[in-house]
Amino acid sequence: MVRFNPPPVAGRLLLASCPAARHVRSFGVLMSASLPPDIDGVADALIGFINTQIMAPGRSITPTDSFEGAGIDSMALLKILLYVETEFGIWIPDEDQVDEHIANARTLAEYLCRRASAA
């Protein structure tokens, strides 16, 4: 049996170590998870997670606020990427982890919807 094992990167290790996840992974997309039907729905889900799990109480961001400008550091970004993988089932390859795709929740949502429609 051939297994798809992405290169080890912090944040991906938890899901990659789950035997069930390895069997449903196909080219970076977990087949069991799904995205909301539109970009706004994905952006809202991302913002909900970020504002409740990452941002300080009383300090929230909007979908177009820059992650960097909001003070989201590399560890917080890893939490966001792990959330994307577990919630939506989309693994983001290292080469796609660029500002063009992950500058803010809106650009990340657009990227995720493109990836999901291409799968």
Image (cartoon, rainbow, N blue to C red):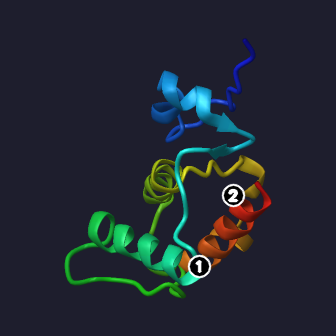
Label ID, residue 97:
2
Locate residue 57, reporting x and y percent.
Answer: 20, 76
Q: How many other residues sit within 10 Å of disc 2, few (<14), some (14-19) or many (≥20)?
A: few
Based on the displayed image, in which of its 4 quarters is residue 101 positioned?
A: bottom right
Q: Residue at x 64, y 77 (%)?
A: 107
Tag 2: residue type?
Gln
Q: Residue at x 40, y 84 (%)?
A: 61
Secondary structure of the residue carrying numbered label 2: loop
| For the residues bearing labels 1 and 2, Cβ distance under 8 angstroms | no
Tell how many labels.
2
Check the image and report above or below for 3 versus 85: above
Check the image and report above or below for 26 versus 23: below
Locate residue 103, reporting x and y percent.
Answer: 62, 75
Residue 67 shows in the view = no
Residue 53 shows in the view = yes
Locate residue 80, reporting x and y percent.
Answer: 47, 59
